[in-house]
Image: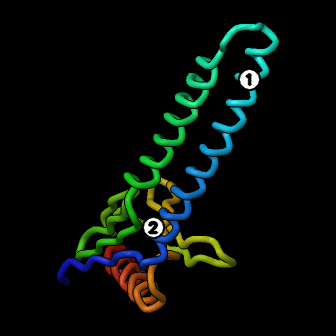
Amino acid sequence: MKEKRYYSQFLYFIKILFIVILLGLAFYFITEVSDLIAEKISRSLRKNMVITEYVLNSIVGLILFLAILLVIVRGKPQVTINDKTLRTNRFKRDFSEIKSYHKGRGGSEPYIISHDGKQLDIELSWFSKRDRNEIESIIIRQIEAAN
């Protein structure tokens, strides 16, 4: 069997876009709150405490920037299957190491169980229906052939 790669649909890009927009809105609201905090502290201490606002904004901005990087770097879901291995963004296993495959039920993701007892989720919800069915049938066929 030749190596086959499956990529997620365009909806995954939209998910990332919405996450970035939501994090941007969160940063905006946090900067407004930090402005109010700095203003109250400045009035109560009768000193210009604008540095408080800058420090809060910098810390929150760094945390949100790292969250955006984590979402983007994590990569969109991809499944690669060949004669001997199953590879996703999260793991790479030989079919001989896989004990069983379990289909997703009730909105849960399908998963495999390895011979050492680990449960590894396969993110198939981002793939088209046709690709999901094809991936599942190949995985089941390859596991049966390897065991």
Task: Kindly identify which residue carries mark 1.
Answer: 39
State yes or no: discs 2 and 1 in contact (Cβ < 8 Å). no
Query: From what the image shows, is residue 88 above or below residue 43?
Result: below
Q: Position of residue 131 (x, y in %)?
A: 40, 86
Farthest residue to the left: give it: 2
- Up/down of 47 relative to 34, above or below: above
Image vertical order of residue 98 relative to residue 45, above or below: below
Measured from the top left, where is residue 15 in percent x and y?
52, 67
Label 2: how many Cα within 10 Å (few below 14, some 14–19, many 20+): some
Q: Nearer the viewer, mark 2 or mark 1?
A: 1
- Rounded to the nearest whole Å, what is the CA distance between mark 2 and mark 1? 61 Å
On screen, residue 45 versus residue 22, left or right, reads right
Q: Nearer the viewer, residue 59 or 143?
A: 59
As helix, strand or loop, the secondary structure at mark 2 comes to strand
Which quarter of the rendering shows the C terminus? bottom left
Above or below, comparing residue 105 to residue 93 in the picture: below
Q: Amino acid at mark 2?
A: Lys
Q: Amino acid at mark 1?
A: Glu
Residue 16 picture location, percent across and down: 48, 62
Quadrant of the image occupied by residue 135:
bottom left
Among numbered discs 2 and 1, the one appearing first in the sequence: 1
Q: Which residue is mark 2?
A: 99
User: Which residue is pictured at 45% across the width and 60% down the height?
Assistant: 114
Would residue 82 appear left or right of 33 to someone viewing this image? Answer: left
Going 50% across and 55% down the picture, which residue do you hit?
Answer: 118
